Image (tube, rainbow, N blue to C red):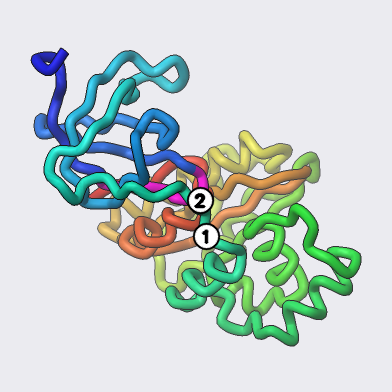
Amino acid sequence: MADDLLSGRVTSFRREQGFGVITLDDGRDVKFDASICKGVLVEGAAVQLRIGPARWGGGFKALHVEARGSSALLAVPLTPPTLDEQIATLQGEHLLSALSEHVMQQLIADVFGGQLGDATLIDVIDAFYVQDKRRAQHDGYLRRVEGLRHGAADVLAEIAALLPDAQIPRQSPDGAAQADGASLDHTVSLVNEALRAAGDPRRLYRLETRGDWHAYLALPSDRARRLATVLPFTTPPPLN
């Protein structure tokens, strides 16, 4: 029914993962899955949609999306960018700048057993930064293994090294050790709150990972929004 369609605009779209966010004209954000669309959505597209309650995480999700204007939907199949294209996007944002073709071939031989197989972009990022810790710090990459206890002061010191001149706490209020991903996320939340309070545009963004390790990238919010098209952040960066 046309009378229950709302209007909005696509404000983010993870093309390789097939989902994104539409901001309604009234300011609400609505998640959508590309599978419910007739074609490929592009950021900035004006759309009409029908919404319903989201099953997970609260809020709303799109149940139906259609074009509002001739250019909103492209009649082409959804084709995720290749790994090379994803790496090129990161290098365009000054990440993985030292990941040359030669270095990539070394990683494939040393880490991936001679072939990438089903390795994801995050697998490649992690393999590169594990072997080049200086570059990891320069690029703002934080990695922690699940189950290992890390002193809160040590974690905060490592984060401080990723965020030069940032006004962040030097010790967790309770001084506790970091035992798992949940407590590490708590420390990261404290840091992000301190950055927000200081008016610092940088934040630590957690990445979706496979295995017993957790990874974060320290990025200004505008870069994080651009990189959300290729990086699987567990929480999308704010739209403004």
Occupied quadrant, residue 69: top left
Q: Is residue 58 positioned above or below 106 on the image?
A: above
User: Mark 1: which amino acid?
Assistant: Pro
Instruction: Look at 21% across and 46% down and name the residue there.
Output: 72
Q: Is residue 13 magenta?
A: yes
Q: Which mark is residue 128?
A: none
Please state the horizontal and vertical placement of residue 21, each as a whole percent of the image.
32, 38
Occupied quadrant, residue 128: bottom right
User: Mark 2: which amino acid?
Assistant: Glu
Circle nearer the N terminus (1, 2): 2
Residue hosting label 1: 81
Please state the horizontal and vertical placement of residue 155, each as a whole percent of the image.
63, 55
Q: Nearer the viewer, residue 135 or 148?
A: 135
Q: Which mark is residue 16?
A: 2
Q: Which image quadrant: the N terminus?
A: top left
Pointer 1 and pointer 2: residues touching (CB < 8 Å)?
yes
Instruction: Look at 65% across and 80% down and name the residue there.
Output: 99
- Residue 229 appears in the rendering: yes
With 55 as the anchor, is 177 left or right in this view?
A: right
10 Å neighbourhood of mark 1: few (<14), some, or many (≥20)? some
Q: Is residue 174 magenta?
A: no
Q: Nearer the viewer, residue 168 or 232?
A: 232
Q: Nearer the viewer, residue 94 or 150?
A: 94
Span highlighted in magenta in the image: 11-17
Occupied quadrant, residue 164: bottom left
